[in-house]
């Protein structure tokens, strides 16, 4: 992966090595049984074309640098790619997202893998943005969970950020979350928190509570955050009142959450609403790649390509 693209990924908080691995795995799914026999039989090796990726529905775009990584892996020249949008941009149906001018075979080789990443990550960003808009005017933010697609956690959590949401922990080692099984195993909230503070004194610590009694105990032992799980609205209000009266502990609500209910929950004073559906049951955004019809066949020459390297063309926005 070229250094410029690696830098773009790293600056957005995504591990470039991880993305490279994911892309290689995804392309291997298409190529493990042999080359693209359809394209090899029907498209001349020197045939060039122009194409665009176009939105079929409104949403928030995400995954453009991943798409570039796919193109690079299939040997499509990035000098022939124009990024019309940026990750995090709102798009309408009919908006162009990327445009291409270059050899057709590697573009079609990249097409499905590229769109799989783009449509899925844009779906995550779009779903997140719907929750963000539902919470406008409150101080509450929407957060993701670890209910992610195996192997895609970094990218899905990046997509949540592109949609305006914030991330919960990335794994099991960057923060502690005391859940019901930990409470049962340790003999109670107090014992679980004490054990974590002893072994990992500097780590952020959150406690999941199902009852107001547990909330009081969690406040008394001094955790950093309390997760109110599957509580009704009245119980959430009561829990927030208990927490705010004695501490500055942040509060998160989760469980049986819907976008229609989100604003009511936000008005109880919670800081975050945790939404697993942002990643575990998201609908992909409909994006498609369209080849310019009747584009003349050309020899493999850069002289006819006018697109700039990884450029963002404001005239096309």
Image: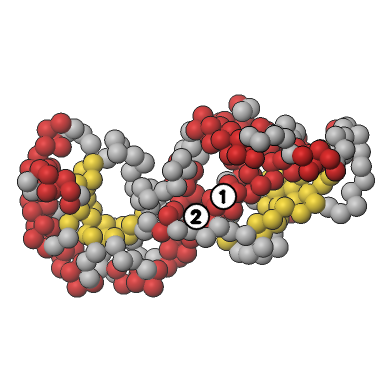
In the rendered view of the protein, which quadrant contains the C terminus? bottom right
Q: For residue 215, what is the image quadrant?
A: bottom left
Q: Residue at x 36, y 41 (%)?
A: 170
- Residue for badge 1: 62
Up-down relation of residue 236 to residue 65 (above or below):
below
The number of numbered badges drawn on the structure is 2
Q: Residue at x 69, y 55 (%)?
A: 288
Residues marked 2 and 1 touching at CB (< 8 Å): yes
In the shown orientation, is residue 22 left or right of residue 184? right
Residue 23 in sight = no
Give whichever of 4, 145 is nearer the camera: 145
Up-down relation of residue 307 to residue 120 (above or below):
above
Up-down relation of residue 277 to residue 64 (above or below):
below
Q: Residue 64 in the image: state x and y as whole percent.
A: 61, 45
Q: For residue 109, what is the image quadrant?
A: top right
Q: Residue 278 in the image: state x and y as whole percent.
A: 43, 57
Q: Residue 91 in the image: state x and y as whole percent.
A: 62, 60
Which residue is most to the front? 33
Tag 1: Cα neighbours inside 10 Å, few (<14), some, or many (≥20)?
Answer: many
Q: Residue at x 72, y 35 (%)?
A: 35
Tag 2: Cα neighbours inside 10 Å, few (<14), some, or many (≥20)?
Answer: many
- Residue for badge 2: 124
SS type, badge 1: loop
């Amino acid at each position: 992966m070229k250094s410029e693209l690696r830098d773009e990924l790293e600056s957005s908080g995504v591990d470039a090595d991880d993305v490279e691995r994911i892309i290689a795995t995804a392309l291997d799914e298409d190529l493990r049984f042999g080359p693209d026999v359809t394209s090899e039989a029907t498209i001349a090796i020197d045939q060039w074309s122009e194409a665009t990726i176009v939105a079929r529905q409104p949403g928030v775009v995400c995954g453009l640098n991943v798409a570039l990584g796919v193109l690079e892996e299939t040997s499509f020249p990035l000098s022939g790619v124009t990024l019309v949008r940026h990750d995090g941009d709102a798009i309408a149906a009919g908006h162009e997202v990327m445009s291409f001018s270059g050899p057709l075979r590697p573009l079609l080789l990249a097409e499905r893998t590229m769109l799989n990443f783009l449509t899925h990550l844009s779906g995550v960003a779009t779903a997140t943005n719907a929750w963000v808009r539902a919470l406008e005017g409150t101080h509450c933010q929407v957060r993701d969970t670890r209910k992610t697609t195996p192997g895609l956690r970094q990218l899905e959590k990046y997509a949540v950020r592109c949609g305006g949401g914030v991330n919960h922990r990335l794994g099991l080692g960057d923060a502690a979350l005391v859940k019901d099984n930990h409470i049962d195993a340790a003999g109670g909230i107090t014992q679980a928190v004490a054990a974590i503070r002893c072994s990992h004194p500097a780590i952020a610590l959150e406690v999941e509570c199902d009852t107001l009694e547990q909330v009081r105990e969690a406040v008394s032992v001094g955790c950093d955050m309390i997760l109110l799980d599957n509580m009704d609205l009245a119980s959430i209000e009561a829990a927030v009142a208990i927490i705010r009266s004695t501490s500055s502990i942040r509060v998160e609500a989760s469980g049986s959450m819907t976008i229609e209910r989100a604003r009511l929950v936000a008005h109880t004073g919670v800081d975050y609403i945790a939404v697993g559906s942002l990643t575990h049951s998201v609908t992909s955004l409909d994006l498609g790649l369209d080849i310019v019809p009747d584009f003349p066949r050309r020899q493999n020459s850069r002289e006819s390509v006018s697109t700039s390297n990884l450029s963002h063309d404001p005239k096309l926005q």
